[in-house]
Amino acid sequence: MIRRVLLVIMVTALPLSADTVGMLTDTMGTSAYQIGIGQISGMTSASSEIFGNPAAIGTHRHMLSYMTTELPDPDSHLLNVSASLPIWGGAVGLGLMSIETNNLGTTASTEFNQYYTVSTFSVHQSLVALGYQTAISPATQSGATVKYFQQSFGTAIAQGVNADIGMTTEFSQWQLSIAAHNILYGSQVQYSDNGGSMAFPFQFKSGIGYTQDNWRLLGQVHFHGTGGTWLKSAGAEWSPWAKNLTLLGGYTELNASGVIVTCTSVGVKLGIAPIALSVSYILSDMFERNSQYFASLDIQI
């Protein structure tokens, strides 16, 4: 039996604020392909799905992937590295996601209400995940992930452990994906400086895909327990000329306590075995800069 390893490496810079950091690992895609279809997860096998739906971490394709983007703000940096290895009965996956934001300012005001920066600090968040995927039937996959979270915010350090579960299935021309994140009720993020704690926000994702000839339509609803946030996504894939060339499109709407943020994406995926190149471009009002460019390279090994 040929054993293959699936690796995904993603490096990007993002203009984050401190209150955005906790949401990013759950709302940002981990490959240019996923971003191009509206940040919908669980519809294509990839090791980066260890952060999305662990049932899809390595069921069909095995590849080496690199993703990068250039943004005008150099103070934020996101790194994603993941790998999956087929084993007896399924596949095992390992992933690391790290987000660092520098030069965040502590401000004060004068008697004339003029604000100035007193000092700066950094926020660093990392997530390490270990997952396993197995087949329930030829068309249905299930998976689970145990993850360790750590965050440093100025001089404070927080850490905690939680778990995710997921399932994918296919029938006829339809594909379904469901995943639940942070399922260990009562598990807390513990802060070292003051003994405080914070609950992991429960999340639930449900996605659907429909394939017809040379195109596929996708949709996903994602509930995030932080402030009752909802993300609704729609995406499409179209291969008009050849199967190895796919055009991508996506739309995401985030509703956080009545504040609506939208994100539109377009992309292209070119596959010439064993290499696949995906390029996506985002227009978004989610971040300070409203345009972002992503590229990822996948190599099967």
Image (cartoon, helix red, strand yellow):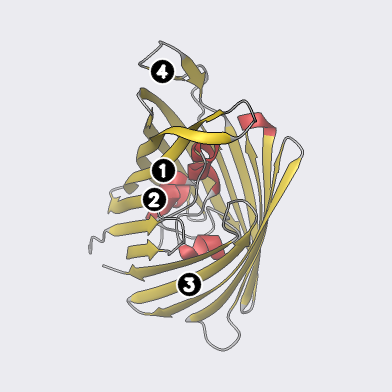
Is there CB contact under 8 Å for labels 4 and 1?
no
Q: Which mark is residue 190?
A: 4
- Residue placed under numbered mark 1 in the picture: 101
Q: Are marks 2 and 4 in contact (CB under 8 Å)?
A: no
User: Can residue 63 be seen from the camera position used here?
Assistant: no
Q: Residue furthest bottom?
A: 241
Residue at disc 2, secondary structure = strand
Q: Residues within 10 Å of mark 3 (few under 14, many from 20)?
A: many
Q: Earlier in the sequence, mark 1 or mark 2?
A: 2
Q: Give the quarter of the image for residue 149.
A: top left
Q: Which mark is residue 30?
A: none
Q: CA distance from mark 1 to mark 2?
A: 6 Å
| Mark 4 vs mark 1, CA separation in Å | 21 Å
Report the side of 4 relative to 110 (left or right).
left
Instruction: Say which label, 3 or 2, has the lower sequence index.
Output: 2
Residue 229, x across and y down, in percent: 67, 37
Q: Which residue shows up at 33% across the image and 44% down it?
A: 96
**Residue 91 can be seen, yes or no:** yes
Residue pointed to by mark 3: 279
Question: Secondary structure under badge 1?
Answer: strand
